[in-house]
């Protein structure tokens, strides 16, 4: 036995819901489990022993939707989430240029602003950003990632790169506002980091995540760099594994937004599940609408607080059907970003269409976010075996805006996670970081209390949809493993499974549920090795 953990409260999350005292690890796998005496009887000369002192141990957390590379990239950028006005943005931008001694012509990139927090109550524009600098191209992305603002110099570079006359309804060249697919025109103008820099960003992100007890991520990285070159991202991962620098396990949600690029990917032999226990090709990821905050989530009916729009549908139904069918035919799982009910119907229809055309073993297609639902949509998730990838932490912001956006009647049937579980839908949990923080405990707290991080509203928003702590933990363990076809090798602590686990500062099953958000990981173990300890 290489390592034995003794005297803990080890909640295995197995199908019987067993709790044990001790666990033994050999060659990165769980080799013994039971009482202290049972496991200690397998000890030998070289066994390391850790006394857990009664602490709670869970399977390592699995974040089933996030953007790991983008997290690394943006954590090196200007953070704007604390800005309460456009003036704050201007001041922080000027400071960042001075602090980083940014040379003439180098890009200033920032992220995280939200006009709902601004005293001016409007988007920033090109003119605002020109007050930061005329000597640096500037691109500042909204918290949701679906809107970006550019200054004059950035607009000039973007125009030179494309074609002066490019016409896209999602680009306002006058105001410097780029939305949805229009953003690509702006991002394409930004200089791309080198492969070495990409590797450093991934390592930086992984090292942050393991501190929250995360041992596996499903991450959407292909479009994180301005050049959107999926081959370079895959090469970066390959090299990191060769160099033994990647601490976390990765299931890549492959964002391939059109038929040409999907075909190129397929031609190179990539298929869902290809790879090893450290890095695997995951599903085709498609983005079919925007965000509720930015009123770009695609709804069946108009927005309550802006009747001029029902959001943005990125694809026509035919385009979407074609993509999902091609993936399905080639044994590629599909995970579709859909927030509005209109987008959800499109996603469900495309999956149904593809599955009908070619019968395969259950492909575990799913929908990421699934926010604006209704009874019919939820029934279809159940009947058509659609996975739901949810982000409980989104409530922190969304519970304040959802009724404004869609009215209180429609809002009653949204973020319906308990209803999903009651129907037997496979629901996994993710953070969508860097859209919001990656703290798993805050995420579990949100699912359990349905309050924001300031404990509002008391008793929780739509309280009948609260999950138990155990259900919430399942979202981030075994259900995440199911979403990557890996329920036989991880997600619970059972004999023969990968030795990925986390030791918590407090027992989240015992403490007041409002305190769950303050719990920390005190030790993270991956492959039987202690890779983080606090
Ligand atoms: Zn996302």
Image (spheres, helix red, strand yellow):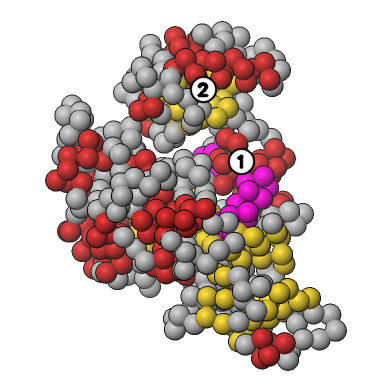
Q: Where 207 falls versus 316 (above or below)?
A: below
Quick one: 393 or 448, which is closer to the camera?
448
Q: Element at badge 1? A: helix
* The N terminus sits in image quarter: bottom right
Residue 224: image tag: none
**Along the line of sight, the residue nearer the viewer: 274 or 5:** 5
Instruction: Locate the C terminus by quadrant.
Output: bottom right
On the image, the x and y values in percent for residue 185 come to 46, 25
Left-right relation of 241 to 284: right
| Left or right of residue 292: residue 270 | right
Q: Residue at x 29, y 54 (%)?
A: 459
Q: Magenta stretch: residue 211 in it? A: yes
Q: Are marks 2 and 1 in contact (CB under 8 Å)?
A: no
Q: Residue at x 66, y 86 (%)?
A: 36
On the image, the x and y values in percent for residue 476 come to: 47, 62
Residue 187 in view = no
Q: Which residue is mark 1?
A: 72
User: What's the residue at 45%, 12% (across, down)?
Assistant: 128
Q: Is residue 274 magenta?
A: no
Vertical placement of 15 versus 328: above or below? below
Q: Is residue 119 left or right of residue 217?
A: left
Q: Is residue 398 above or below residue 227?
A: below
Residue 112, image x and y in percent? 48, 31
All told, the count of numbered labels is 2
Say which quarter of the image contains residue 241.
bottom right
Q: Which residue is mark 2?
A: 139
């Amino acid at each position: 036995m290489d390592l034995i953990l003794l005297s803990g409260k080890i909640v295995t999350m197995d199908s019987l819901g067993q709790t044990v005292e001790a666990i033994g690890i050999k060659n990165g796998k769980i080799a013994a489990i039971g009482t202290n005496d049972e496991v200690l009887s397998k000890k030998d000369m070289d066994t390391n022993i850790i006394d857990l002192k009664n602490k709670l141990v869970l399977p390592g957390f699995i974040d089933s939707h996030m953007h790991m590379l983008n997290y690394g990239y943006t954590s090196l950028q200007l953070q704007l989430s604390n800005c309460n006005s456009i003036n704050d943005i201007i001041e922080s931008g000027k400071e960042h240029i001075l602090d980083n001694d940014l040379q003439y012509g180098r890009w200033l990139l920032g992220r995280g602003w939200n006009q709902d927090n601004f005293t001016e109550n409007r988007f920033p524009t090109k003119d605002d950003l020109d007050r930061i600098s005329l000597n640096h191209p500037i691109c500042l992305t909204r918290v949701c990632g679906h809107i970006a603002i550019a200054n004059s110099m950035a607009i000039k570079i973007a125009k030179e790169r494309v074609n002066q006359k490019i016409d896209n309804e999602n680009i306002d060249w006058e105001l410097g506002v780029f939305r949805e697919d229009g953003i690509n025109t702006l991002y394409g103008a930004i200089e791309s980091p080198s492969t070495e820099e990409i590797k450093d960003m991934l390592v930086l992100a992984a090292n942050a995540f393991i501190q929250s007890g995360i041992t596996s991520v499903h991450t959407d990285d292909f479009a994180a760099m301005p050049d959107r070159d999926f081959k370079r991202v895959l090469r970066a991962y390959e090299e990191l594994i060769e160099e033994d620098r990647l601490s976390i396990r990765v299931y890549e949600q492959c964002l391939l937004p059109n038929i040409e690029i999907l075909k190129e990917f397929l031609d190179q032999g990539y298929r869902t599940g290809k790879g090893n226990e450290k890095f695997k090709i995951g599903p085709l990821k498609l983005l079919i609408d925007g965000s509720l905050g930015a009123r770009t989530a695609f709804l069946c009916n108009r927005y309550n607080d802006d009747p001029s729009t029902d959001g943005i549908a990125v694809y026509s139904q035919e385009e979407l059907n074609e993509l999902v069918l091609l993936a399905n035919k080639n044994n590629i799982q599909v995970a579709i970003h859909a927030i509005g009910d209109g987008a959800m119907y499109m996603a469900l229809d495309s999956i149904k269409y593809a599955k009908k055309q070619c019968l395969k073993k259950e492909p575990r297609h799913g929908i990421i976010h699934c926010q604006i639902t209704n009874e019919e949509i939820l029934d279809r998730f159940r009947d058509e075996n659609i996975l739901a990838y949810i982000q409980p932490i989104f409530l922190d912001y969304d519970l304040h805006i959802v009724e404004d956006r869609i009215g209180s009647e429609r809002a009653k049937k949204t973020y319906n996670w308990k209803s999903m579980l009651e129907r037997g839908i496979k629901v996994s949990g993710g953070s969508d970081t860097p859209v919001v923080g990656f703290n798993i405990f805050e995420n579990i707290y949100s699912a359990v209390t349905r309050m924001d991080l300031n404990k509002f509203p008391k008793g929780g928003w739509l309280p009948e949809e609260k999950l138990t702590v155990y259900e919430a933990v399942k979202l981030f363990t075994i259900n995440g493993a199911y979403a990557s076809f890996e329920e036989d090798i991880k997600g619970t602590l059972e004999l023969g499974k990968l030795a990925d686990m986390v030791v918590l500062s407090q027992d989240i099953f015992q403490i007041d549920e409002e305190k769950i958000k303050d719990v920390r990981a005190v030790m993270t173990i991956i492959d039987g090795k202690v890779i983080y300890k606090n």
